[in-house]
Image (spheres, coloured by chain):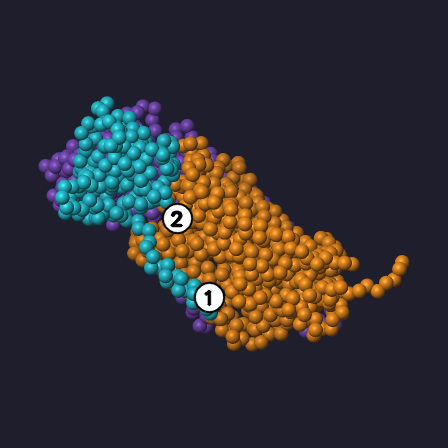
Amino acid sequence: MTTEVVKEVHLRDSSLPDNELHAVLARTWATPRGLIGWLSVVDHKVVGIRYFITAMVFLAAAGLLAVAMRLQLARPENGVLGPDLYDQVFTMHGTTMMFLFGVPVMEAFMVYLVPLMVGTRNIAFPRLNSFSYYMYLVGGVMLWIAFAFNTGADAGWFSYVPLAGPEYAPGKRVDFWAQMVTFTEIAALSVAIEIIATIFKQRAPGMRLDRIPLFVWAALVTSFVIVFGMPSVMVSSTMLILDRLVSTQFFNPAEGGDALLWQHLFWFFGHPEVYIIFLPATGFISAIIPTFARRPMFGYLPLVLALIATGFLSFGLWVHHMFAAGIPALGSSFFTASSMMIAIPTGVQIFCWIATLWLGRPVFATPLLFTIAFIVTFVIGGLTGVMVASVPIDLQVHDTYFVVAHFHYVLVGGAVFPLIAAIYYWFPKATGRMMSERLGRWNFWLAFIGFNAAFFPMHILGLNGMPRRIYTYPLESGWGSMNFFVSASAVVLAASFVILAWNIIYSIRKGEPAGPNPWNAGTLEWTTTSPPQDYNFARIPVVGASDPLWTAGGLAEAHGLKVESRELVVTTTAEAQPDLRESSPVPSIWPFLAAVTASATLIGSIFTPWAVVWGAVPVGVTLIGWFWPKSVPEDEE
Amino acid sequence: MRIKLLAVGFLALATAGCERLPKSLDSAGRGAEMIADLFWFFTAVSAIIWIGVVAALIAALFRRRDRTSERNAEETDRAAHDRAARVVVTAVGATVVTLLALTAASYFTDRGLVNLTGDNALTIDVSARQWWWAAEYASSDPSQRVTTANELHIPVGTPVNLKLSSADVIHSFWVPELTGKQDLVPGRQNVLRLIATRPGVYRGQCAEFCGLQHAHMAIIVVAEAPKDFEAWRQRQLAPAVEPATDEARRGREVFLQKPCVMCHKISGTPAGSRAGPDLTHVASRRGLAANTLPFTRGSLAAWIADPQSVKPGSKMPLTQLTADELNAVVAYLEGLQ
Amino acid sequence: MKPLLIAVCCCLVVSGCKREARDVRGAPAASSNAGLIVMSTNSPGADSPVKTVNASAEQYNGNAYHISEGQRLFRWFNCSGCHANGGGGMGPALMDDKWIYGSSIENVAATIREGRPNGMPSFRGKVPEQQIWEIAAYVRALSGNQPQSATPVRSDHLNAIPHMQKPEGGEEPPSTSSKPAEPQ
């Protein structure tokens, strides 16, 4: 072997002292300033925060719609909203909450946290990440502008045909809805692909698959569910657009189509969709409980298996939304069994969480309070879910306020409470300031009491004959007093969100400064500064166990990455052995331009099929600009 | 003390109006009975599970912890860990067994619902429209077919098969006191089987969002003794009652000259359109406009004068009638028992 | 802060724009002022003092809801009995560009209301005014005279109702080209 001095062609982090290293890395990984810089950003943290803020704005908007609905329903034969406006309001409420808030807010957390938790500098495919945010933003804004023009979707968030078909839904209302679905599907599929690639290939060396945080496992399973579930709704919404635009007959029974085809295709996506929202929430809980029980999670392997089982089983449940549609009884019973079965992995998760709290020493900070609210509330929702999984019971309560109560219990209890817990937990990391504990307690109590008071009586209303999606009800029905109570409680729930918003806004400026690890947690994101530097980690950590910060002996570091160009480590899939040095894309305006052309094409195709033809040209141009090969200085060693 | 008062006040408010059981649990039909029994079973099991989980959570959070657990930490830790593992495995096992029991119970009730029929079943073809219910009592002899709208009469104790179809969008037939619901899907025919066990008047409502007036699409099912049912059926088969007064006769003229005749059928007159509800025996029904209004003189006049203020978006248009014409038509329709 | 202000301003701007109207109720004392509609755009001397456009007609042209109601009423009142689904039979075709009595919505409404020689019944008094306008709007849609964004592309029934742009549709009266309609 000949020894020769290897000339340092590129500056590497092994040869720099810490303070210089930080300065050089900050320069290399900086986000450029100005409007063009703002549009060209590829930093996953910035994109994650954008997703978060946009999703919270949509949450507020849809929440206001809910308040409007409750005002209308507070009294029998009320005149606050007429039928046309009410139909638009409840459709927009459901659509916004599911497509524009529920999934994107989970995407926000996954995009922000996963690279930090696995110990890498940026998410995989950062330009695709940026593009996906613009597509989501345009899709949501387009739908709401349509609503402002009195052409908001009005056929329900799941838009059943023939009511949403060309004859019974005149105008462009449902077309805007269907195209918004396309926008958000593109965004979600993009994020899913990035998350899967990041988790499989960009983990810190030594972070074997059995050492990755449970939130990362949840993000991985969610991403696979997105990849397999979203195409179904993309197909069905495209078929609906085609039916309404160019007169195909997919859903026209008189010409050989089938009204139930829509339901199958939609719900094949629709059921996994709620798990897309719920699984990251379980990830939040799995991250928060160990920190606030001050011990590692009990039952890591069963929890991982439960996540995977839930994701897998979620594809076998969809017909439970169609029990009253005329499906043969034997087939329906199969879906009763599978819908009950999915309660088992969820039960495993809950038992392991409680066991962790039992074995640990709880700290009663706001994140733990919301975790408690989650367990108490979500279990009610899960149990009413077991009830509606049964065909006979569902035949009574399907499409009534019982189901409204059920899904709000599982969505608010099972996703929003964990989300609020996650906000309080990771806010210090993202902003460098703590949120107010005092406001947090007010937030918790108002939310918990307001939510249960508003939604528990709905079970009884549903059993008493009140169907869903009615803009009013007769005085003789006897539903008036309970509806009034529900509406009053909804105001309490709304107040809790106002407190949350105030806490966020206040704490950004005036919150107590937070260090890198104010909760004394164990995962990698808590080694960075608060907020993290653009480059996340000065040196990529090397991990020897799960909960690396709780492992005695401190954290090892990997050396050898270039510092003057963007570089990160690619490791092997299972064992996380360092494999390659990979360059990470610099900020680029092309994702924004591609989003502009794609949006113009998609919005144009609401009005004419020719938009697809003519729009393909600018889309092609921007994609070529995006993918034009750039020369990257290769390793010489 | 204050918290207790608050809790009591809260419960009082929450249960305000709870004089009787919710309709789907107050069964008047065999199907509803079976489902209600299953529901109570599920509720009991669910309550036990929820209380158990919450109790475990509270215990986990607030149990007394030995402060000296730092010493012997690993040993007690290992023992506690194993204990916890045993409890979790037991809980998971109990969950599996419970779910199996619930699934089995559900399956048996489902079988019961499917078998709710018999040889002497009465068949009614129900066709849902935006936003009313058309019904025709099936018979091999066309002259025995009763055509009505928005109100069904059935004999108590006799199996009834409802053949459900839709002329436009998806609707759902649901009378909670009798049995579960079934959708009416255009392009398919679904069947709903029920047996009433108690005479009475039962109100149901469309349970699948079907457009602007989904909220005002109610159906009334009157379950009565078999001989009362037969009497009703015979009355319904007769052609329209001849108008008794001059005003009513004038009303019939107005009906036949105005837009009414374009959509409504009255047997025994030239009006034969089936676009809207059959009015041959409209005065024998309890409600108007798919049971949005009670059948009274005032409601009838209000409905005909301006349907769009009662049911905005309904398919019945505003017609131009003078006051005399309106009174005449109301007098005529009131007589159509 | 600035992005938020910009967003709020945009919202305010949008809320001032013209919104889609869905009127379920026609004018209360419905105006069947047929006498005030001229049938021809030619008049001797100076312009006619009577408008050729009925004010209430504007709310029906280009309105998706009204055209959709017209589609339903076309089926309910059995217009297909003579006109098939636009192709004609005993009655003239409705989806071509040959308009015996004019193609403006006022003309079509007058046709429905008053009837025409050679078989078109008069529906005055039998079809309320609003519904006449809705059917007229739909008939214009059959020949491609309504904007694409407001026209239903197909029905949810047997698909005999035509759709999309028809090459033969249009507003040209036939007086310059074809021979007069023959009694059939």
Question: In the picture, which chain is cyan?
Answer: C
Residue A544: x and y in percent read 75, 62
Whole-angstrom CA distance, mark 2 to mark 1, is 28 Å
Identify which residue, A448 or A209, lies in the foreground.
A209
Question: In the picture, which chain is orange?
Answer: A
Total numbered badges shown on the rendered structure: 2
Chain B: give its colour: purple
SS for tag 1? helix
Residue C176: x and y in percent read 24, 32
Label 2 is placed on what type of residue? Arg
Residue corresponding to mark 1? C3
Q: Is residue A575 above or below residue B126?
A: below
Residue at 71%, 53% in the rendered image:
A573
Disc 1 packing (10 Å; few <14; some 14–19; many ≥20)? few
Label 1 is placed on what type of residue? Pro
| Residue farthest front in this picture | C45
The answer to whether residue B205 of the structure is visible from this angle is no
Residue corresponding to mark 2? A173
The answer to whether residue B110 of the structure is visible from this angle is yes
Residue at 41%, 64% in the rendered image:
C8
Identify which residue, B54 or A278, lies in the foreground.
A278
